[in-house]
Image: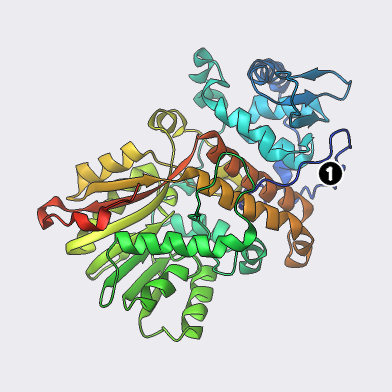
Amino acid sequence: MSSSRHHRLGVGHAQPHPPGVPVAETPPIDADRWPDVAAVPDRWSARTREAVAAWLFARASAGVDVRIEYPDGTRSGRFSHVVQPRMIIRRPADLFRRIGSLGLIGVGEAYMAGDWTTDDLVGVLTPFAEHIAHVVPRPLQILRRAVLPRHPADEENTTANTRSNISRHYDLSNDLFELFLDETMTYSAALFTPAPTAEPGRPVWNDLADAQHRKIDRLLDLAGVGPGTRLLEIGTGWGELCLRAAQRGATVRSVTLSVEQRDLARERVARAGLADQVRIDLLDYRHVDDTYDAVVSVEMIEAVGQKYWPTYFSTIDRVLAPGGRVAIQAITMPHDRMLASRSTYTWVHKYVFPGGQIPSLRALRTAAAEHTSLRLADSSAFGMHYAETLRLWRERFLARRTHLAPLGFDATFARMWDFYLAYSEAGFRAGYLDVQHLVFHRPSDGPDDARFGGVR
């Protein structure tokens, strides 16, 4: 953790801080580890940008159901008679200077620095996510590219850069991920039953492992994985899908660019006595060879980048046997929002997923159709399930945050990870983000619709 480009992840909906009770002060920030958090922008234009950001924030917050509290006792936001989440602004000038200089990156860095805090982080972020398309007035949106940071060239997902991008998140520490994941070590949306509602709290922690297996089994069913299937998995995670597929009698090849994930996944496969059926390689998906009856990929396409979506689908098309099926789990956003945000360098890029790009369903369908023989045969959305998955992860992360220091992660990292998980949950609760099960096949291979019945 050596610079401000130390990027990592998390999610959930913790118990709100009691109203009226002050939130604890933020511990000192290590400026060597977190230079952009420790220092507030101070270039010559910062004061002008601060004033513009304060105006934009007042305009945006007027329509959200959040009570905003300032140090002088004034309040803003859309007032209502119900209990509202509190956004407590401790250092307004610092917050607005960060926002004016860095856009939404500044909101996250200000939270990490303690410029603002809250008694209910998800509750504050969700209403803003619901209004994200209108936070910046349209006439000012065209200026974003000129005044806000751009994507670093070394984070483009070329074969030379992708290994570094992946490592900066997934190679943080297996022990870190074990703090908040369930025993399956599955780091993607679970599939609960009954389905969660918009209100948090229905699934409980003990449901999560079963819900992860339900999700994995559905993907394997959609891909037609069974005895004798030659399966390619793009993006290994920590190996749970490999295990479930091998237990069905499949022969599995899984590829990843995370050393930590590869090593633990291999250990888990060996302990299960399935090493003769599963091969896990440290390999870029673009370099996969051989032929497979089925391809499954879980929340990996978000790390590919829009420029390389055609390459991703072309690779799958190249290695898929005649009659084969492809099952992909993908986080998605509305197409218009994807187009509006695709060039924006965000807090998530800087601190969590460098090089990432969340696609739209339309964009994935088009990329496959225009560059391969694959066609989208079925899709099923279950975004609220992800909100609940994140809630459980964050609940467990916050309960175990005292374990972070022995692993080498400081208090600023804890606030970063908390913000990441809450920020993600808010996106799904607001409907700004969704998650989909997608099935692709080649129409020329002939109909095989029996596998797709009832998946909605």
Residue 320 x, y percent position in the rendering? 22, 62
Query: Is 317 or 158 nearer to us in this picture?
Result: 317
Query: Is 24 or 171 nearer to us in this picture?
Result: 24
Q: Is residue 364 above or below residue 98?
A: below
Determine which residue is flagged by label 1: 26
Occupied quadrant, residue 197: top right
Please state, as top left, top right, bottom left or bottom right, where the N terminus lies in the image: bottom right
Residue 337 x, y percent position in the rendering? 44, 30
Q: Circle 1: is it few (<14), some (14-19), or many (20+) Cα within 10 Å?
A: some
Q: Residue furthest front?
A: 194
Regarding residue 287, the answer to whether it shows in the image is: yes
Regarding residue 6, the answer to whether it shows in the image is: no
**In-image side of 9 versus 403 (left or right):** left
Residue 302 x, y percent position in the rendering? 43, 48
Count of number-bearing discs? 1
What color scheme is it? rainbow
**In-image side of 330 versus 427 (left or right):** left
**In-image side of 316 versus 278 (left or right):** left
**In-image side of 83 versus 263 (left or right):** right
Q: Secondary structure at mark 1?
A: loop
Q: Is residue 314 above or below residue 52?
A: below
Q: Amino acid at mark 1?
A: Thr
Residue 245 x, y percent position in the rendering? 37, 72
Q: Residue, x 53% and y 75% (percent of image)?
A: 264
Q: Residue, x 53% and y 59% (percent of image)?
A: 187
